[in-house]
Amino acid sequence: MNLSRRITANFFWITGSRGLGKACSFVMVLLLARALGAEGLGKFAFVTAYLALFGVLTDLGVDMILIREASQDLKGSEDLVGNGIVLKAVLAVGVYGATVLTAFLLGYDSEKVLYIAIAGAGFFLAPLTCYSSAFFSTLNLHLPSLVEGGSRLLVLVVVVFLVWAGKGLALVFAAIVLGGAVEAFWKVLYAQRYFRPRLGIRLKLWKWMVQEVWPLTLVLIPMLLIQRIDQVMLESLLGDAELGYYSAAARLCEAFLILSVAALSSIFPLLSRYYAQDPASFERTWRLAFKYLALLGVALFFFLFSVSEPAVRILFGASFAPAVASLKVLAASLPLLFTGLLQGILFIVIGRQKSLIPIGWIATAVNVCLNLWWIPVYGTVGAALATVASYGVAVVGMSSYPSLVGFGVVQLKSMLMALLPGVGSLLICTFALPGPSWTRHVLFWSLYGLLLVVIGTLKKEDRRLLKSIFAGESGPEASH
């Protein structure tokens, strides 16, 4: 298989595997919501959010550095990967102890501390992810993807049985950890066909790895805090039931992020190559990417906003009705996330990733302050508003960064050109064309598509690009 076909195949393997994992996770949440109610789902959401805040410390970006080095010389990286495994094992032990101790010191009840202790055992699997260097360096990702998808299905089957048998969350968390262990075992076994890392403690290598990963770590931590700190704060301020409602809304919204991840995974190597080799194609590619990601994010916002009530009722049950308002607010984060992630990738492509550090931490500080202010006043809707506001701060920060304002101008223009037709269509369908719900939906999307053409958001070049994709051409030049 030639290189381009292998990259394309790997893209579909990864996308399919992650999509299956997201689907299994979402179905598991639905089962827990139905079986345990809002309070039980709130406990599950709290434990997963709490552990996520600590989990980033078990990696610190080490895997990415190891993959980069192994891609250049797999056999020659055996010492480095072996030291990375030991370094991550030390981190895992320390982080697990800190996670459980912090939960105890913060006064969480014994039930939640038990759940944290059980689920946190998954941290000890973190060192084994270093073996993924073998798969990425050789571009053989089909079997690891199959193993990953299979483990997610296994966990879902076990959780279905546990819910059917009336078992509690302790066994559910144990099943999740066990599924991760099975996945890690098979990946390690398969990776040893390619190389055998030599475990060791070479302080010079450890120091080098830490120096390489610290900027990435300082970018990842605030991103994770914005995504999860609101859930930890909701549990503390309002309790498990309110967190359960919010978690239902957040899970529904996050289910659509796989679309942006798939799109960005495919264009990241393209942007990297064009930046180094073809500046004109680089600019054309990121401009088109902003437009299409903005269109996708805005369309999903209107879709989720319009179907939030029946979606929550059908998927989670009538008792989760309080989640509807939060879902409508969180839906507004999708255009910001879709285009903001592209902005972040562009910073990395051009070598300005360190510039993301202050932007991320300012957005996180805004998120925490707004949560402290708005959650007591507006409840779960306040947490949703704080999340959207912090994403907005991050987008504005990146858009106004000196010397990179061009990216931000195109991003904001793309969102505006996608948003205005939607707002106009919504106003027309709501006030000028009353009628049954289904007719308003049909009219809205028809008007939206028409207005996108009328104001010039969608042009002939977009039709030519779509035609070129189906004709098998490649690259941005195909649309000329």
Image (cartoon, rainbow, N blue to C red):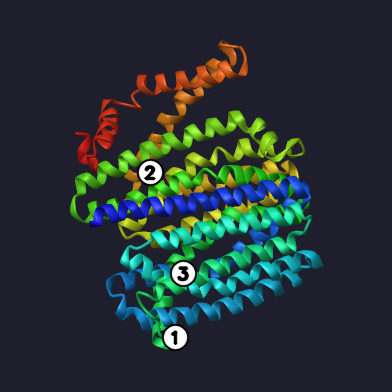
Instruction: Please give the residue where the numbered disc 2 appears in the rendered image.
Output: 408
Question: SS of the residue at dot 2?
Answer: helix
271 vs 243, left or right, is left
Tell which circle, 3 or 1, labels the residue nearer the N-terminal end: 3
219 vs 238, left or right, is left
Residue 272 falls in image quadrant: bottom left
Which residue is depicted at the point 44% across and 79% down? 84
**Marking on residue 187:** 3
Question: SS of the residue at dot 1?
Answer: loop
Question: SS of the residue at dot 3?
Answer: helix
402 vs 374, left or right, is left
Which residue is depicted at the point 59% across and 14% down? 431
Residue 380, percent across and down? Answer: 70, 44
The amino acid type, in three-letter code, at marker 2 is Gly
Residue 50 falls in image quadrant: bottom right
Q: Nearer the viewer, mark 2 or mark 1?
A: 1
> How far apart, in angstroms, are the residues tagged by discs 2 and 1?
45 Å
Please tell me whether residue 218 is drawn above or below residue 326 in the rendered image.
below
Please tell me whether residue 402 is drawn above or below residue 110 in the rendered image.
above
